């Protein structure tokens, strides 16, 4: 018998000195085993030893940047039909692949404490061996005894599980005894653990040695994670330099979670603040050149050629890439030359790319160290403003204060009013107030457990048994869910299946083969947390709309958000459209002729700041035709993200009966009709109604009694208060009046593009009381934006030690935890064959079928058929796509040159851009297709600017109606019939961040009927020679660095070449950039 560690008395910190050894704990040791349970040592689990179908492993794990542990795992099989029956697909984190993969078993991990235990290991005797007759390996008996103070850490317990007909459902969900009247919770809370292990005594004694455990890991950032001043953070970072921490999807304690979520935000940007100060303090000479034919005094516009110090680029390379990525900066002018008419002060500036194409600068050749700016004299009201060339830490501060810090142990509930917890109730009914408060506290504990990713063992163990029914009732009362069975998670009903008419009308938005499983998934969600994932074109946004309508009908008011304004726009618009269709179906079936409709449309408001809304509304009534362009934009300031559809300005126009928007129908909310009736009768709004309806023009309106801003805002507030769904960005959700509405009225949260979202941004909107939440996204497309990924200082220390954590989205987090995911399986958008390449490279783990709208003979794919015909005629060597398929094409630009901006590192290829535009002009003119059905995108902003400039030439006039070129990231969530990707790279520049698999995935999935890639097909190596790709450094769009082997890009090139879908174009000369 060997004793690896023992305690003396009740002191869990005293150890017998281990014998001298140089042995170091291995990173991972995993031995098949079986557990002996109860006084009779009954066998539980032991699949690896030929007993049962429940797996059990003895585990010794010493992972990087985590506390090492000795423990065991239990593995319960998931039902093979879980996904088909609507439970969803569970996943397990794969450290080797760095992602979560579909799981076949439900895993519970038991981690023994570092101190307070005694461990004995001995060879299994004959009696023990006889209980495992099929096992031929050596067996050992391992026993662990815990003293009174010692506690195991349990990971994975309490999460959703399903395997219909299997006894494990009784154990895990209903608390039935497993053996000898011992339940699973009894096994986990026992003080003596016994295992029969498939290992020799000597080997097991070496691997399972408590004396080898290193000290528990802890991050060196303390326990105070509230927002601090920049200099405090700087001092903390200076004291704790080092390697980049391994990413975490689960945390042993709340302080680890708070550290990771807060430091990932702060370290991503705070170092830039100091670099920006240094750049501001750098004095440089520059000379001014007037812009255009007007005098500079009249226009206030100049070009400025700035001579930067020779070492500027090397000194500020990483910072400058980020600070200048939007090409908007400010310059501080001081000490002008005597007699100069240039005023000192802070001037807006744009970084000019490709200055040689500007006539005014052709006589001013620049050197590599010189920077060309276009500047604007400050307007009169801007004379006294201060510098703005600084890091805007507002979003980082918001993420920490309004998100991360909500999960501190002392944090108050984020939305007590939504549960009815008010001061008035406390005074009038203290008992009811205490009951609600206790329920909220339980919700907060559950929410912390979800975010820690360890399962719900501590939550269940800490919950007094006498209050089980109370806590379950509190979840039920808030969510209308069915009371759960003992020890199972409270289930929230997001779809009330008892409302058959509503369910039938709603599910017509879903494919017939998916209706049953989707309804089942929504009708019973543990804790109300639902996650929908799918590849591009699989109908994620429509699925979001269906689920959100179910939630709004069952729960009440919802808050909808997304990481980008475009994603919020798309989700809100789709929700409104689907809601209108569902409401019409219901009323067509149920409403009697001449009677009011039985169902009303949900009021969806896509809201913006009230100032933007008011300004846009005034511009609308002044000129009702520009639509989305009515919110003023300026190249000198941050563009407004305002769009007309569903905005408060839009609904105000609806209320005023403006003909440029839709009119209220009988199935719109009664409250909207009431607001309109009130406005119709209000004589003070008479002139406003007249100008909105077009009965008078703006000139006549402005001469009379104009409505006050307060009156217009009053209409907006009335609509806002009646909304069923408010949709904004996460930042806007944290400011009045949106924050007040969210914290007092919202009963559920919906997030689109949640795989592109940071965890703190989710928490800013979700809060800390475990409201029902729907997350929709694709974790294989663009991850959350991280400014600082792998940059190091001169000593090799990482500037952001939590860069790998920053790219973990909520969907990544919950997927790795093992939460059931609803996966969509049908491609709806792309023509048959257009998604095959992406599916084989990225989504091979997901079943694929093309939907009924993907057949290439359908009218919506006519332009794709014409493109194929055109390319076959233009390039006779192009191999035809298989019958019934349309396939992508690569246009290889032989001899194309590419240029890298010396400061931003952004790439551009005027040659490739010109080839693409010439090809499109010929296609549009010869095939008689609409240019507006085509879009050009590029990975690089410099290339997008080059394309925009080239399109201004007369020879490209046929493309005038084509949408402006976009970067890949700005086009995520959008689509077009034909997409042309101008890569902007060649063998000299390397693949750049076109090799990034998430970005490449987005590029290859924006089209419906046709995809053309224009670039250098040999950028990752000659396609005719299958050489293994090399690891390369990639600089991302935000200036961040990371490494890749470009495997996917290389496979795409090989695949297209092997299929005969690569054509060659010889570049005759370099186009002007």
Image: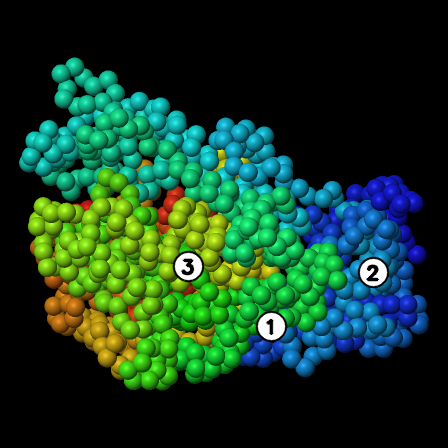
How far apart are labels 3 and 1 at the CA level? 25 Å
How far apart are labels 2 and 3 at the CA level? 45 Å
Mark 3 vs 1, N-terminal side: 1
* Above/below status of 105 relative to 970: below
Is residue 451 shown left or right of residue 374? right
Q: Residue 800: x percent and y percent? A: 51, 40
How far apart are labels 1 and 2 at the CA level? 32 Å
Mark 2 vs 3, N-terminal side: 2
Does the residue at mark 2 contact the one at mark 3 (Cβ under 8 Å)? Answer: no
Q: Residue 58: x percent and y percent? A: 76, 61
Q: Between residues 408 and 375, which one lies in front from this camera angle? A: 408
Check disc 2 and report its element: helix, strand or loop. loop
**Residue assigned mark 1:** 482
How many neighbours does mark 2 have within 10 angstroms: few (below 14), some (14-19), or many (20 or more)? some
**Residue assigned mark 3:** 560
**Residue assigned mark 2:** 190
Mark 1 vs 2, N-terminal side: 2
* Above/below status of 780 relative to 236: below
Q: Residue at x 66, y 42 (%)?
A: 218
Mark 2 or mark 3, which is nearer to you? 3
Q: Residue at x 45, y 39 (%)?
A: 269
């Amino acid at each position: 018998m060997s004793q690896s560690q023992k305690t003396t008395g009740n002191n869990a910190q005293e150890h017998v000195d281990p014998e001298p050894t140089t042995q170091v704990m291995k990173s991972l040791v995993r031995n098949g085993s079986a557990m002996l349970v109860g006084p009779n040592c009954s066998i539980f689990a032991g699949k690896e030893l030929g007993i049962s179908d429940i797996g059990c492993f003895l585990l010794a794990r010493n992972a990087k940047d985590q506390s090492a542990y000795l423990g065991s795992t239990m593995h319960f099989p998931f039902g093979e039909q879980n996904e088909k029956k609507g439970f969803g697909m569970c996943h397990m984190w794969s450290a080797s692949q760095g992602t979560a993969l579909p799981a076949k078993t439900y895993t519970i991990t038991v981690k023994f404490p570092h101190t307070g235990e005694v461990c004995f290991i001995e060879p299994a005797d004959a009696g023990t061996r006889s209980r495992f007759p099929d096992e031929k390996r050596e067996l050992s008996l391992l026993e662990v005894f815990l003293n009174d103070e010692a506690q195991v850490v349990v990971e994975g317990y309490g999460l959703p599980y399903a395997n219909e007909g299997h006894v494990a459902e009784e154990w895990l969900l209903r608390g039935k005894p497993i053996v000898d009247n011992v339940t699973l919770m009894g096994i986990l809370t026992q003080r003596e653990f016994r295992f029969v292990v498939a290992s020799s005594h000597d080997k097991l004694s070496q691997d399972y040695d408590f004396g080898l455990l290193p000290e528990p890991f802890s991050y060196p950032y303390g326990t105070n994670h509230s927002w601090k001043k920049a200099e405090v953070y700087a001092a903390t970072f200076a004291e704790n330099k080092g390697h980049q921490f391994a990413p975490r999807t689960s945390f042993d304690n709340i302080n680890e979670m708070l550290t990771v979520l807060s430091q990932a935000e702060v370290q991503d940007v705070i170092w830039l603040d100091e670099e920006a100060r240094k750049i501001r303090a750098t004095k440089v000479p520059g000379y001014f050149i007037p812009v255009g034919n007007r005098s500079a005094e009249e226009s206030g516009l100049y070009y400025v050629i700035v001579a930067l110090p020779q070492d500027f680029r090397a000194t500020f390379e990483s910072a400058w890439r980020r600070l200048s990525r939007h090409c908007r900066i400010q310059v501080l002018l001081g000490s002008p030359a005597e007699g100069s008419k240039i005023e000192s002060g802070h001037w807006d500036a744009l970084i000019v790319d490709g200055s040689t194409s500007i006539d005014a600068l052709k006589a001013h050749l620049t050197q590599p160290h010189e920077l060309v700016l276009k500047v604007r004299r400050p307007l009169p009201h801007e004379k006294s403003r201060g510098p703005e060339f600084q890091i805007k830490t507002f979003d980082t501060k918001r993420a920490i204060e309004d998100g991360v810090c909500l999960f501190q142990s002392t944090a108050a509930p984020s939305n007590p009013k939504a549960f009815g917890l008010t001061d008035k109730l406390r005074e009038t009914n203290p008992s009811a107030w205490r009951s609600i408060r206790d329920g909220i506290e339980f919700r907060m504990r559950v929410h912390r457990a979800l975010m820690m990713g360890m399962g719900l063992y501590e939550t269940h163990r800490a919950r007094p048994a006498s209050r089980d029914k109370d806590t379950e009732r509190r979840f039920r009362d808030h969510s209308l869910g069915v009371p759960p069975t003992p020890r199972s998670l409270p289930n929230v009903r997001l779809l009330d299946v008892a409302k058959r008419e509503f369910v039938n009308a709603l599910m017509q938005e879903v494919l017939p083969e998916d209706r049953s499983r989707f309804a089942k998934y929504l009708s019973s969600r543990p804790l109300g947390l639902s996650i929908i994932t799918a590849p591009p074109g699989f109908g994620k946004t429509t699925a979001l709309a269906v689920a959100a309508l179910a939630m709004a009908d069952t729960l009440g008011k919802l808050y909808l958000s997304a990481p980008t304004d475009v994603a919020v726009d798309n989700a809100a618009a789709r929700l409104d459209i689907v809601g209108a269709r569902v409401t019409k179906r219901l009323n067509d079936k149920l409403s009697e002729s001449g009677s009011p409709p039985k169902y009303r449309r949900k009021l969806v408001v896509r809201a913006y700041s009230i100032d933007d809304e008011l300004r846009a509304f005034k511009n609308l009534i002044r000129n009702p035709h520009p639509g989305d362009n009515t919110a003023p934009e300026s190249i000198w300031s941050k563009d407004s993200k305002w769009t007309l559809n569903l905005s408060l300005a839009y609904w105000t126009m609806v209320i005023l009966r403006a003909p440029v928007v839709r009119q209220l129908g009988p199935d719109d909310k009664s409250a909207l009709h009431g607001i309109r009736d009130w406005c119709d009768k209000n004589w003070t709004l008479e002139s406003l109604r007249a100008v909105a309806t077009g009965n008078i023009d703006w000139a006549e309106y402005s001469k009379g009694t104009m409505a006050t801003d307060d009156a217009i805002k009053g209409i907006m507030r009335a609509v806002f208060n009646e909304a069923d769904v408010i949709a904004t960005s996460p930042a806007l959700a944290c400011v009045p009046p949106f924050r007040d509405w969210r914290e007092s009225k919202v009963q559920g949260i919906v997030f689109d593009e949640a795989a592109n979202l940071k965890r703190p941004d989710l928490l800013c909107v979700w809060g800390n009381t475990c409201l029902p939440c729907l997350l929709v996204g694709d974790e294989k497309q663009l991850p959350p934006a991280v400014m600082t990924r792998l940059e190091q200082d001169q000593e090799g220390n990482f500037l952001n030690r939590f860069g790998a954590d920053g790219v973990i989205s909520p969907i990544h987090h919950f997927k790795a935890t093992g939460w059931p995911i609803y996966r969509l399986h049908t491609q709806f958008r792309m023509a048959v064959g257009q998604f095959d390449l992406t599916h084989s490279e990225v989504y091979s783990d997901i079943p694929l079928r093309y939907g009924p709208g993907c057949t290439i003979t359908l009218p919506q794919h006519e332009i794709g058929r014409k493109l194929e015909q055109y390319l076959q005629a233009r390039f006779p060597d192009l191999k035809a796509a298989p019958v019934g398929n349309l396939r992508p094409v690569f246009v290889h630009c032989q001899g194309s040159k590419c240029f890298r901006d010396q400061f931003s590192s952004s790439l551009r290829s005027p040659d490739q851009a010109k080839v693409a535009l010439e090809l499109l002009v010929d296609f549009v003119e010869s095939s008689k297709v609409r240019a507006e059905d085509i879009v050009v995108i590029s990975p690089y902003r410099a290339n997008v600017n080059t394309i925009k400039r080239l399109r201004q030439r007369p020879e490209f006039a046929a493309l005038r109606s084509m949408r402006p070129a976009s970067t890949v990231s700005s086009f995520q969530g959008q689509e077009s019939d034909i997409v042309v990707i101008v890569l902007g790279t060649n063998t000299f520049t390397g693949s750049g961040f076109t090799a990034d698999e998430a970005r490449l995935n987005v590029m290859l999935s924006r089209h419906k009927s046709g995809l053309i890639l224009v670039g250098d097909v040999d950028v990752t190596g000659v396609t005719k020679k299958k050489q293994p790709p090399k690891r390369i450094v990639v600089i991302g769009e935000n200036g961040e660095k990371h490494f890749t082997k470009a495997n996917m890009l290389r496979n795409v090139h090989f695949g297209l070449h092997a299929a005969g879908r690569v054509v060659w174009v010889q570049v005759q000369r370099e186009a002007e950039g």
